[in-house]
Image (cartoon, grey):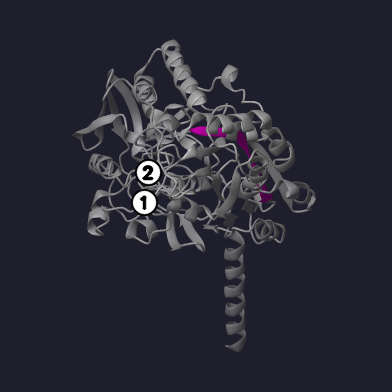
Amino acid sequence: MRNLTKVVTASLVALALAQAAEAREFRWSTGNDLQGLDPHVHNHGVTNAYKLNIYEPLVYLRPDGTIAASLATEWELVNPTTWRFRLRQNVRFHGGEPFTADDVLFSFTRIRQPESDMSYTVGSVERIVKVDDFTIDVVTRGPNPTLLRDLTLFFIMSKSWVERNNAMAMTRAAGASTFPELNANGTGAFRVIERQIDVRTVAEPNPNYWGQRNNNITRATFRPIANTATRVAALLSGELDLVYPIPFQDIQRVSSAPNTRVVQGPSGRTIYLGLDVFRDESLDMPGTGRNPLKDVRVRQAIYHAIDEATIVRVVMRGSTQPAGLFIAPAIAGYQQDMSDRLPFNPDRARQLLTEAGYPNGFPLTLSCPNNRYVNDEAICTAIIPMLTRVGIQARLNAQPMIQHVNNANPPGYNVSLFMLGWTPGNFDVSNPLGELVGVNGAYNWGRYRNDRLEALRPQIVNETNPERRNTLVREALTILRTDLPIIPLHYEPQVMGILNTVEDFTLHAQEDVRLYQVRMRQ
């Protein structure tokens, strides 16, 4: 009997070891945490990338920029302003609720609340009409040739789940602890099983997923690690399977290590400086009744003061190119012949400041994230002496991305000069024209307004003739290059470090980690 017990025990141990060997946990990290799990609130790159694994849109954007079916299987343009979508049947949310047209209509209502940063995805939509349980008509205010691209981040929630958990309301604050920020119930290939803010978010495969998966992951753990040295060390020690971004000074070390590799490529993101062109009195000049940034000559002076070529060469290690537009070459609407920058010219900067009435400069705070973009704080640190050189008394306020966003968001808009990076969700110029410089733009922290630009934007959205649309785009970009509510810096590269535990990983211009495409080595 004793020998039989030993045999059984040994067999159980062997079985457990075999099961453990089959388990494939994928562990990855970046510098900042998700801003939350609510799919209708935060328009933030890391957050949107994660949501794509949990929630699904009607259609999604492939890495090559083409549109593919997701919760909609077919679509057709019925008339210039009506798109008919056939919805996928036999799909269930993670909680077991069946997916129907009612969930799409409900999500449309919810995402249009004022607190949503994602309402732009349906900004051109007038209404959605239910034809039957698995057919809807999306009616736009005018023709919209980019509608399908817009809808790629319109995530569908379960109507009954939201109502049952009293989760209709939303808060725009990053890191909020509301129910839909800490819990998720999508139809995606993975489901969230644990969420600890600033610690980890854990997901596992959805066993009832309707689609195919090209992965062998049994568990996916996302860990935000703000300190770059700690993040790289965790990769090299085998504690993490993928980290990004890798600092340029560590690329050689990661590339030459025996168990890691570096994957690099372009992205659709532009790094830029935004300016408060709204306040009559600068936050940095209380009691003066003056805001120098409202004067275009001052904005030109700041532009001329920045030696972007040196930033690219030294801080970015020559990995990218200076930007003259607020959209990257990968974005529809990019104009190569309009991509030149104002020249670096400190003497001209001083002259412009004098002409504007600031011969001795003025105090100015540059607000910057320190854990979001490639070398973000280092870029801002380099800009400070450049501004000082022309007489501006510049100081740096660098802080984690969540604090940076919460500080700059409405209603406070507590920034004067700030860094931000932007990848248009639809990879089209219409997105930043609305979100970054539109009157109601969620990230128009400088509260810029140009009436002609406001008139142009809906024309650009609705124009179906490519040549006429391009003419409108060029006019809009000319306005921005003249007014300078935004000073573009450079196009951000992607630099990811990957442990050899990962067999296959595809780099996307969208900068997302699509768990269903990650394969671990056996």
Check if residue 495 falls in the magenta segment.
Answer: yes
Q: Is residue 462 above or below residue 128?
A: above
Q: Residue tagged by mark 2?
A: 117
In the foreground, 233 or 421 = 421
Image mark count: 2
Point out residue 163 in the picture as x, y percentages from the top left corner.
Answer: 23, 54
What residue appears at the point 46 percent right and 22 percent down from the top-left corner? Answer: 479
Q: CA distance from mark 1 to mark 2?
A: 8 Å
Label 1: state its secondary structure: loop
**Left or right, residue 34 beside residue 132:** right
What residue appears at the point 58 percent right and 29 percent down from the top-left corner? Answer: 352
Label 2 sits on what residue type? Asp
Q: What is the number of the mark on residue 307?
A: none
Point out residue 216 in the picture as x, y percentages from the top left corner.
Answer: 56, 51
Q: What is the number of the mark on residue 172?
A: 1
Q: Is residue 420 above or below residue 138?
A: below
Dot 1 or dot 2: first in sequence order is 2
Q: Residue furthest bottom?
A: 2
Q: Which residues are magenta?
A: 484-498
Check if residue 27 falls in the magenta segment.
Answer: no
The image quadrant of residue 447 is top left
In which quadrant of the rendered image does the N terminus lie? bottom right
- On the question of residue 30 being in view, the answer is no
Q: Is residue 355 above or below residue 166?
A: above
Label 1 sits on what residue type? Arg
Local packing at callout 1 (Cα closer than 10 Å; few below 14, some 14-19, many 20+) is many
What residue appears at the point 42 percent right and 33 percent down from the top-left corner? Answer: 437
Q: Are marks 1 and 2 in contact (CB under 8 Å)?
A: yes
Query: What predominant SS class does the magenta segment belong to?
Result: strand
Point out residue 271 in the picture as x, y percentages from the top left corner.
Answer: 57, 38
**Left or right, residue 455 beside residue 340:** left
